[in-house]
Amino acid sequence: MKKIISMLLCVLMCISALAGCGKTDNVNSKSNDSSSNSENIELSVFAAASMTETLTELAEKYKETAPNVTLTFNFDSSGTLKTQIEEGAACDVFISAANKQMDGLDITADEEKNPNKLDFILTDSRCNLLENKVVLCVSKENHKNINSFDALAKALKDEKILMAMGNEDVPVGQYTQKILAYYKLEEKELADKGKITYGSNVKEVTAQISEGSVDCGIIYQTDAYSDNLTVVDTATKDMCGQVVYPAAVIKNSEYTKEAQDFLDYLKTADASDVFEKVGFTPLS
């Protein structure tokens, strides 16, 4: 009899243990479901250096719209960012300061613009987000009395000035090259004579002007505003073309929906107010 009772107790204990395991699994399953519904997302945004101040401000505002999304930024020249994306850097959203770098990653672009047939852009997400202006800024003292692009061109021809510009792989540098060509100035010749210094992104050019290590420099209107620099002239479309900032979701992003949501937010009136405050013109 004792053996039978012992066996019955063992069976009851096993049944009870199994039932307990079943309840635990159900609780864990619900917990996992709940966790996935409020999953914390980290979006990596690669953006032109000239957007540092505006996007940093908008990141704080975006928390109210998407509290579960954390934005991390990589600010640099668009050429550097393009190379990093090509090499496999984790990126969800790319905002370039020129179409050239975006085209180089977009399979739908002409072969001339994307000769390597790179396919990194979620094509339907691509948009022209903003327009900027290219401006001529002078150092605080402005000892050379540069007051226009015409005056800059004459001073460069007379070799009486030191000017800062972006490298050739930097959009602001490419716009500057067009301005030099407009005035029939030879960049290499001027650089060899020590009349031009370079920056690897627009922030480096801005710093040279702000520090007074050059007489003047060519940067974006938005960077001049952010650093409180003196603008003496604005380049026309004839001089350097339209300065458009395209934006797109990266094709291999793990969070394409959330990336698109953030891109859509950048087109809202709330975001436009921030962009317009520093000199951007919203295009979307």
Image (spheres, grey):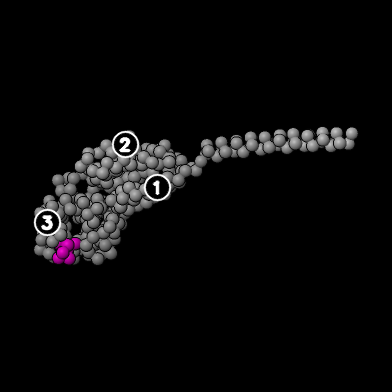
Tag in front: 3 or 2: 2
The answer to whether residue 245 of the structure is visible from this angle is no
Residue 44 percent coordinates (x, y): 40, 47
Residue labelled with disc 1: 90
Residue 99: image quadrant is top left
Residue 116 percent coordinates (x, y): 26, 44
Residues at marks 1 and 3, CA–CA distance in whole angstroms: 40 Å
Could you tell me which quadrant the C terminus lies in?
A: top left
Q: Amino acid at mark 1?
A: Ala
Residue drawn at point x = 39 percent, y = 43 percent = 92
The answer to whether residue 142 is left or right of residue 261 is: left
Q: How many marks?
A: 3
* Disc 2 secondary structure class: helix
* Disc 3 secondary structure class: loop
Residue labelled with disc 2: 123
Residue labelled with disc 3: 185
Q: Is residue 282 inside the magenta stretch?
A: no
| Foreground residue among 283 and 9 | 9
Q: Which residues are magenta?
A: 190-196
| Foreground residue among 210 and 182 | 182
Q: Amino acid at mark 3?
A: Leu
Q: Amino acid at mark 2?
A: Thr
Residue drawn at point x = 16 percent, y = 52 percent = 179
- Residue 195 numbered tag: none
The reply to whether callout 3 and callout 2 are in contact (CB within 8 Å) is no
